[in-house]
Amino acid sequence: MSHLYEKTASDLAGLLRSGKVSSVEITESVLSRIESLEPAVHSYVNVYPDLAVSMAKKADEDIRRGTAKALTGIPIAIKDNMCLEGRKTTCGSHILANFRPPFDSSVVKLIKDERMVILGSANMDEFAMGSSTETSCWGTTHNPWDIERTPGGSSGGSAAAVACGQAIVSLGSDTGGSIRLPASFCGVTGMKPTYGAVSRFGLVAYASSLDQIGPFARDIRDMSLLLNLIYKHDSLDSTSVEIGHSDFTSFLDNSVSGMTLGLPTEFFGKLTNEDVEKNLSEARRIFEKQGVNFVELSLPSLDYGIAAYYIIAPCEASSNLARYDGVKYGHRAEKFDNMIDMYCRTRAEGFGQEAKRRIMLGTYALSSGYYDAYYLKAAKIRTLITQDFKKAFESCDAILSPVAPAPAFKIGEKIDDPIQMYLTDVFTIPVNMAGLPGISCPAGFSRDGLPIGMQLISSHFQESKLVQLVSAFQRETDHHLKRPAI
């Protein structure tokens, strides 16, 4: 038998139900993997062996009683911006270094009710602001396929953990590509659901109109199981949409013959990397072989997506991060002369460079005399992007595109060049601007052996189409089965 940490959640669930393994055995296998790889990969901010084993024992009791659910006993990593009662939730920032929430986020509550096993909090860019997991105050996460390269961001820890067996599945959050980019760079499957489909209650806010929690897994079946669990209305989240859904696993075996995929000229016209082009061309050939039709389409407003995003997101960050003032909770400067000095010193000490940059950008754009020139104009662009997508979906079931302009880049390569870092998200940002669901699925490898993902985008609350398409693709390919040799 292969190591338990190498298996998928659906395989492990079968073994648990048959009594061939226990949740404690699975959990100890994953914890051992974490212990051996953490010095090299650094997927986690905090690991909780005591909590994990305790939860695994309770899961085994449920299995013995016959009350187990679909994911009972499966170990999961939680991104470090989702509140976990009594345990540190730091958002990768010094300003929340010792913050212990007095409550669970809604997704964590669902995980506990399912009797899943929480391994710990996964590393992330500070306040989810980044595309490489280099801005975390706890240090950089490394890509398991090449530890000199970034795993993507901001959910780099969540993706890296799943890629190298430090978690069976995980949760991340996606504000401008923070699930899909790490999924692509680390060779796993990751989805950003429709805005409002998954509760954000207890998710520490970066940009409230863009943030969305979503799953990471090794294949589409595992991802569908986790999506089933978290895709629920929540009265505690005012933006949560009351919409039912079918069991996403029921779409896994459906044929895709007759479906149509759109190819946006604005995306493919920007592609310059031969490896990405080659793998996307091969993906298209595989879909065509399965009876999928293709149509070229135009989304003209996408050219303004990055510019509009980097007005809207920093404006919301400026507002959301104003609460970290050293008064109610979080870091407080030890030496100060008066109240204003305390605010200034606290924020100067607590926030990292990228967080400060985005706060200042947002504060400037919202300031008197500039609101109409920047924020209002960006909001109008956002409406145009949404309308472009709506029109596109009149002629196709989903849109195929790259996830990133190139495979994973080296650590340190872009961290001092914010513009180049921001352009990494050129293909993912428009999906958040329009509130659409998007998925990254392993589509091949570069000449250097680095994973390359493809992105599929569907209309609002049509995640089932993405599941159907990715499942069909994974039936014909083995990219998702390959593991890093770390």
Image (spheres, rainbow, N blue to C red):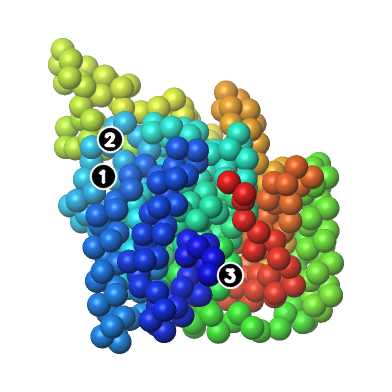
Q: Is 50 on the left-hand or right-hand side of 380?
A: left
Mark 3 packing: few (<14 Cα in 10 Å), some, or many (20+)? many
User: Does residue 152 appear in this view?
Assistant: no
Residue 134 disc label: none
Q: Mark 1 points at which residue?
A: 88
Secondary structure under tag 3 reads helix
Report if the CB atoms under discs 3 and 1 are less than 8 Å apart: no
The alpha-carbon separation of the residues under discs 2 and 3 comes to 35 Å
Is the residue under label 2 in contact with that under label 1 (CB below 8 Å)?
A: yes
* Label 1 Cα neighbours within 10 Å, binned few <14 / some 14-19 / many ≥20: many
Name the kind of residue labelled 2 in the image.
Answer: Ala
Where's residue 239, x and y in %?
Answer: 38, 62
Quarter holding residue 325? top left
| Disc with the residue nearer the chain's start (1 vs 2) | 1
Q: What residue type is labelled 3?
A: Ile
Element marked by disc 1: loop
* Nearer to us in this view, 278 or 437: 278
Residue at 50% of width from left, 41% of height from top?
Answer: 41
